[in-house]
Image (spheres, grey):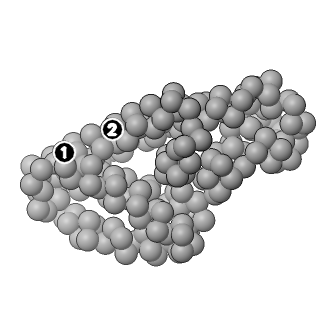
């Protein structure tokens, strides 16, 4: 991990492990081996795994919110925004070998602290609202067909994409994600 500070290296290794194996699927011993430090050194940066999870969700949501802002700025139609987010969710599964961090955290929710669960919920509320705005824009600019309730559509879209990730992960087959979102993609006017 030359050129990278230890805290960042630990966060990167933890995110990679959580996205591949879930929050409960890795230990500090795994991170120590990955980063090349002693397990006790991890406790200097993250005294408990709950502290690590809090730092992970904060970093992840900050990155995700910036990505959504950039997508909105770069794409002028609701359909283009929606297609971009679907593509991002698709890319994040790495052929069915990974999940986005928030989906991975949802699977291990019983092991998460109330603070992390609150951040996870806030993430879902934020993304669903962003998607609702994309559906509203798509309805007004004609780039998404059949929009009746943009708020409900945003919530359903988020559930669909996260569920599609789980199906693809279970089968280790990225095409399962594509099949799950195919009807949604068909509603986007090109």
Q: Is residue 64 left or right of residue 126?
A: right
> Quick one: SS at disc 2?
helix
- Residue 83: percent from the left, percent from the top? 32, 58
The residue under label 1 is: 151
Residue 125 marker: 2
> Quick one: SS at disc 1?
helix
Residue at the front extreme, as displayed: 110
Asked if marks 1 and 2 touch (Cβ < 8 Å), the reply is: no
**Residue in the foreground of this view, choosing between 44 and 79:** 44
- Residue 167: percent from the left, percent from the top? 46, 68
Callout 1 crowding tier (Cα within 10 Å): few <14, some 14–19, many ≥20: some
Q: Quadrant of residue 110?
A: top right
Does the rendering let one see residue 84?
Answer: no
Callout 2 crowding tier (Cα within 10 Å): few <14, some 14–19, many ≥20: some
- Residue 61: percent from the left, percent from the top? 48, 36
Q: Quadrant of residue 29?
A: top right
Which residue is depicted at the point 21% across and 42% down? Answer: 133
Separation of residues labelled 1 and 2 (CA atoms)? 11 Å
Q: Is residue 116 left or right of residue 67?
A: right
Residue 5 marker: none
Pick the quarter of the image with the N terminus. top right
Which residue is depicted at the point 86% across and 47% down? Answer: 33
Q: Is residue 146 left or right of residue 135?
A: left
Against 45, is 143 above or below? below
Which residue is depicted at the point 48% across and 35% down? Answer: 117
Pick the quarter of the image with the C terminus. bottom left
Against 35, is 85 above or below? below
- Residue 75: percent from the left, percent from the top? 29, 48
Against 67, is 84 above or below? below
Q: Quadrant of residue 181?
A: bottom left
Against 142, is 13 above or below? above
Q: Earlier in the sequence, mark 1 or mark 2?
A: 2
């Amino acid at each position: 991990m030359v050129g990278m500070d230890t805290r960042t290296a630990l966060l990167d290794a933890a995110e990679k492990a959580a996205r591949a194996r879930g929050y409960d699927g890795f230990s500090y011993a795994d991170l120590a081996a990955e980063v090349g430090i002693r397990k006790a050194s991890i406790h200097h940066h993250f005294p408990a795994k709950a502290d690590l999870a809090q730092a992970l969700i904060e970093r992840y949501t900050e990155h995700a919110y910036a990505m959504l802002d950039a997508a909105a700025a770069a794409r002028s139609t609701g359909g283009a925004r929606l297609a971009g987010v679907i593509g991002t969710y698709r890319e994040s599964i790495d052929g069915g070998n990974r999940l986005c961090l928030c989906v991975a955290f949802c699977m291990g929710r019983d092991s998460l602290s109330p603070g992390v669960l609150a951040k996870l919920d806030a993430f879902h509320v934020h993304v669903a609202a962003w998607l609702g705005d994309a559906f509203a824009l798509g309805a007004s600019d004609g780039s998404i067909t059949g929009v009746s309730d943009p708020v409900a559509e945003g919530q359903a879209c988020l559930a669909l994409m996260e569920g599609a990730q789980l199906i693809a992960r279970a089968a280790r087959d990225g095409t399962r994600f594509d099949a799950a979102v195919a009807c949604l993609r068909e509603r986007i006017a090109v």
